[in-house]
Image: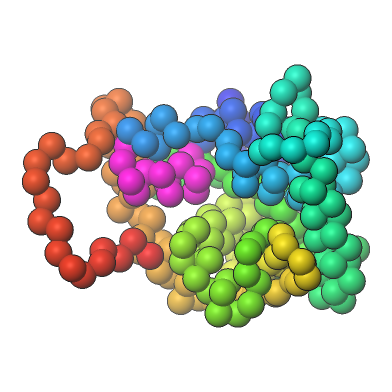
Amino acid sequence: MITKPGFYKLSHDDYLADPALDVSFLKKFVKSGKHARTETQETHSMRFGTCFHWAVLEPKEFVRNVREKKSGYAEKKDGFIYLKTDDIKAIKAMKRKAWQKKTARNILKNAYAKELSGFFELWIGQMAKVKIDIIAHDGLIVDLKKTIDASEEGFYWQIKKYKYHWQAAFYLEAVSKITGIEHDRLGIIACEDKSPYECGFYMIEDDWLEQAWREMQPLIDKYAICKEQDKWEGYPDEFVNLNLRRRNYG
């Protein structure tokens, strides 16, 4: 367990095992405390994403940790992630396309740091963690994402659905606190996981970050109470009025 703020070079498994609060936990905490505490299994999409990150950012880790199988979903076995042949081909195609793009190529070639685990203290006195994909020499924080749609319109909805603005706000807060230098720029390299494997490049603007903190702060305060009392509630044990207007969770 990491108790001192800073950057660390941790393995994927060691990072996941650390109990510090991360955005993935908060996303599940929106649903309920019980879901956040129990939904810990990695999905096929998550494992595919991990392997894609290795391929682009740490090719030696990809060779060391990924094995091929004929079919089926990604699975973890004997310390390796097994991907079907078509998934490995897709990851290699995604990597080639990213390197063909001048914007991505310049960032990847000139990165100051890659795949750093960052730990920082929240106002509630608890440690939080982030996995930073890239820190550029000019201070730009860059996140690498696989997506089904990297178009401007398509990725806008991906940001809302998967709360990437929460992740961006966490990343910037972490790097700013750890380095003592304010970082306020985060860019995303969005790579499609189907042919033609196109890439889009997007900066997360201030309005997204402000919305992220408006949404996360009450959850983090509630998390602190749940953790202190060790009480993680599920859904309300009463009827809730369900009207036509959709609830806005960001």
Which residue is outermost to the bottom?
Answer: 152
Give the residue at x 63% y 55%. 175
Label total for image: 0
The answer to whether any part of residue 178 appears in the image is yes
Q: How is the image coloured?
A: rainbow
Image height of 67 relative to 202, above or below: above
| Residue 225 place in picture, x, y as percent | 28, 37
- Nearer-the-camera pick, 21 or 249: 249
Side of 160 where 69 appears, left or right: right
Q: Quadrant of residue 212?
A: bottom left
Q: For the stretch drawn in magenta, what is the main secondary structure?
A: helix
Quarter that holds the N terminus: top right
Q: Is residue 61 visible?
A: no
Is residue 97 part of the magenta span, yes or no? no
Whether the magenta-drawn stretch holds residue 28 is answered as yes
Pinpoint residue 118: horizontal percent, then vertical percent.
64, 45
In the rendered structure, which segment of residues is drawn in magenta?
21-33
**Left or right of residue 86: residue 160:** left
| Quadrant of the image containing the C terminus | bottom left
Q: Residue at x 68, y 32 (%)?
A: 75
Q: Residue furthest front?
A: 71
Instruction: Give the residue at the far top of this rendering.
Output: 78
Residue at 69% x, 48% y: name it.
Answer: 49
Residue at (60, 33) in percent of width and height:
16
Q: Picture coordinates of residue 32 (x, y %)? A: 31, 41
